[in-house]
Image: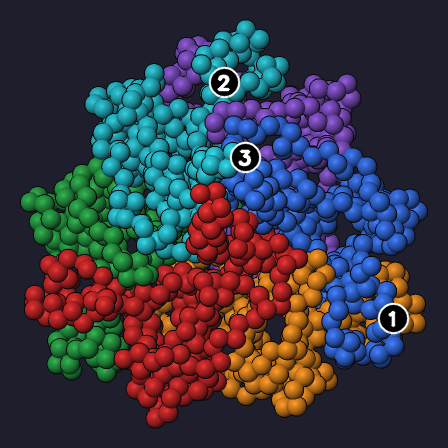
Chain colours: A cyan, B purple, C blue, D orange, E green, F red
């Protein structure tokens, strides 16, 4: 039983590492999550590779809505730990959309690398701020507000986003509302839809 | 033209007062917004009334979904300015709901004062945490996550909520998504609904 | 000796869990303290019960000063961990008091659920802000300031307080000053009392 | 009436300047409060004198308890604005005391420049941490906790304190409790003293 | 004299707007600096253009060291105010360098849009973390640490950087050390150079 | 192998302890790093000695530039953990210097205990703020900005510095730039020096 303890430690550790952090000012230069008990690798064991990410050179896999988004947060790029930032690459097929969503823990700055993107957000007074932005333009989505994008050009489009949190979180509205199992009755009243209409939406967004 | 300047100052000031603040640690005991140029009333002019709110003794006006919610943030209770907190009273008719919504800038703690409330939230992995809570019970909704409530008892119900921001913000999903003017095409693709279905939803939630 | 190590881990862990946290923005949806090595339970193991507290449906045990206060911080409601908030239920007998005290790490919002409470705080300029508040009224006590309450009605009274820290801390003035063992001489000079008077106070508030 | 407006602006401004700040990370190098409308002097008008303070070369005026303390916060050294720190010089006569007090918004680090000082704090579990420290030694008082000092040597003593807030605040327990006007009845119950004893204390600490 | 007051207000305002902000959590959705007395434009006057920046579609003007860097902080893109982020576009001629520098108030994430860049930082233990990164790769420079870049490819290169502050600040080492007017004697001792060598460096980096 | 696990734990722990912390508001009174699994010693095991530091009564060892600086951060005074502050004692021989350096994570307040010190900082606009300060004077160096000192009196001098971070970090410009191994070519271009001049500087500051 004893020899298993170290395994147990390693097993629990990855979770600990990624959940311990927080986005205040760091109290050390960096903190590369370790595979030992300590939260950080001994800083003398850090390597330049810990601070470089090479996994977004190409688009990811496209979803049904024509989006390929790779979120690069502390969970897949541990070097970001305690540094207060993360990023995302989003590729759009022609007509592809990034459905209405929000990040509970970050502001986002979105750079258009390629294409023409209808892009916007909705504030807490329900006002929309949306417009088509093009290659080289930048739009900012304020912290926690609902936003969305659609490739309205006739070529694929790409956006590079940055966040001021190592783990901004992502809530996709259709999935969170219709795919999580909220009581049907509540949804009917909230959206003014009948039981059949809600059932159809719940079916579409049910997790498989 | 000169005499109008002071009016102009007063006019702009209310907005300044409520938008200047921020939720970090205060650097003074309190800061009651002033009606002068300064951000705060001279502290010697503060009165106990500045720190007491008497406007939620009774339910507010009920909406179509059977909810009467009074949000008491820094905009209506200026004494909260720089103190990092605010609150809400929510009354539910039998069957009344608080539609799926989120607060971009706060965690919420909800106390059930009366009744039986189906209450829950959805995390960023799309998992639901929901349950019926009763008089005297308390539920916490983590910062920025989507949550909702429905009175499932046979009596009116009341909830008292607290926030860790002087201005948590409120995004009601149906209104923000269907009532703000997001491109129809984008919504069709996001929800897998046809143009007629989306039009119906947009009409229902259009601001009047 | 080996087999005892896991026990040791569990033993130390509860302390670790509750002392690791901090009140900045969270970097994950939530972090239910685990009973393993990791700081948080694997998020997929979280349950709705982790976010609901049912222990303040009724008053606690009354003290000699006629107060029954149950502080619900992260130590007794672990689901609050990293969420930046906590709360308290305080019941007062007729004439009961909540002695002068302060919370070193939080602002407090106090809702009167029942009764008439003389309630107030003192700022750093030594000014008092105090008044009788009644059922349905709310008073805010700014971060770190000394405050107090007394049931001045002819019925029992109840207050519900919220804090913007998962662990606000509580310093009761009489106990901290006279019951902690501060040098008698220093106390005599501070309060202008003689050795006998101080001895009486120290005896009253000595920990038993 | 018009020409008076500028005077009004200047009048309100000093208050605005010192109450606007906050202790989060600055968003500019520094922010010397201005005598104009802007919160900060134009940075090009800042001078080295704005960042140097020469007013604690000598002890201040001694109080009845043998203490001469000069708090140097943002109100008297405006260059500290937005920089998150302030300081204090405290001189003690033989036997002089710094009565039990706390700073609602800061940790304090106290350096002994001269003498032997009985120095300590009380935590929220009512435990005392106190000891005599000497020239060259340093003690830390955790954020918001009650602490105190007494010169136990046979020579005058001096302490230099630093705070991690530009305006830490100071609550002297005897004055805040007995000199602010808290209801006599409440104080009697809190301290277990009779009406005459409380009256004596209130008289001693009443503001003159 | 009266009519000039408004001009004065406008004059001081731009400075106030950009220096008031801070990088804590916002307490409103956004705060577009106004040209009136208030710190923010009335939110109903905000337009989508306030949140879009179009000024980095093309490289800026190249310096002697082969760098064209456009820092887009709150001073030139006011919509970033209170949102906690900013960005930079940096173009490099073949062999061009971004000299050793640091940002006192931010972490930086650098995306390589084009080219091959030798890129690195030095930690507080004086260890270097440097490597050639290529198109599509990302490197993170921890908060406040010294870093640098050089185009080592045979084509122009471009980097897009993001910061977790609306105004990260920039300190270029050669200019700050040799071009600011630090006493010659101090520099001689610090670098172990003789008076002639220091004079040469001071001349080169003297502001023109 | 089993018995070694505890050793391993202890081994990794010291690093964990000092790297876990962060400078936001604490969520407990204090957190003395433990030698067990938990991040903090059980608070009941804390002793007054944990909060007192006696190691800067005398100057440290002087460097070649005539400086003896002892940085007292959380790594050598663990009681500072989570309390947001640290300090330094710096002694200067006649003519001794504290070379241009900066602290990536803190503002510094410097008290002159003895002597006459030429002392200053450079802001992000490359402006210098420097002056000779004397015994009893205090200068503040804003967060993250480059600063320096030189004893210009004819007696030894001493400075006591305080920081608003438990681990402010220290970057000495000459060592970081010339002693860390940055590509020679990049340094030549940055400073406009030839290969021989850079080689000389690199040699001088190479770590031994």
Asked if residue F60 can be seen in this view, the reply is yes
Q: Position of residue C10 (x, y in %)?
A: 59, 41
Rendered image quadrant of residue C49: top right
Q: Is residue D14 above or below residue C79?
A: below
- Depth check, mark 3 against mark 1: the one in front is 3
Marks 3/1: CA–CA distance: 49 Å
Res B59 quadrant in image: top right
The answer to whether marks 2 and 3 sit on the same chain is no
First along the sequence among labels 3 and 1: 3
Provide the chain ID for the residue under circle 2. Answer: A
User: Which residue carries the number 2 mark?
Assistant: A179
SS assignment at label 3: loop
Name the residue beneath numbered marker 3. Answer: C41
Q: Which residue is mark 1?
A: C200
Horizontal and vertical percent position of residue C21: 55, 47
- At numbered mark 2, what does the secondary structure look like: helix, strand or loop? loop
Kindly identify the residue that appears in the image at 44 percent across and 14 percent down. A208
Which residue sits at x=63%, y=59%? F45
Q: Please name whichever residue, B52 or E158, is drawn nearer the observer in this view of the structure.
A: E158
- Between the C-alphas of marks 2 and 3, the distance is 24 Å
């Amino acid at each position: 039983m004893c020899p298993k303890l170290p395994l147990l430690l390693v097993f629990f550790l990855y979770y600990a590492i990624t959940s311990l952090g927080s986005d205040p000012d760091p109290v050390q230069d960096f903190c590369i999550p370790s595979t030992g008990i300590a939260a950080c690798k001994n800083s003398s064991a850090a390597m330049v590779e810990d601070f470089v990410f090479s996994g977004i050179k190409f688009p990811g896999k496209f979803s049904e809505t024509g989006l390929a988004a790779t979120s690069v947060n502390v969970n897949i790029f541990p070097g970001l730990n305690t540094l207060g930032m993360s990023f995302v690459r989003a590729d759009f097929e022609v007509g592809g959309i990034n459905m209405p969503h929000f990040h509970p823990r970050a502001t986002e700055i979105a750079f258009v690398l390629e294409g023409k993107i209808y892009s916007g957000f909705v504030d807490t007074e329900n006002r929309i701020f949306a417009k088509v932005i093009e290659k080289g333009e930048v739009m900012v989505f304020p912290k926690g507000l609902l936003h969305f994008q659609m490739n309205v050009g006739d070529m694929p489009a790409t956006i590079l986003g940055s966040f001021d949190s190592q783990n901004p979180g992502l809530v996709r509205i259709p999935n969170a509302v219709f795919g999580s199992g909220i009581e049907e009755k509540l949804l009917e009243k909230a959206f003014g839809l009948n039981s059949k209409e809600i059932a159809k939406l719940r079916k579409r967004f049910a997790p498989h």
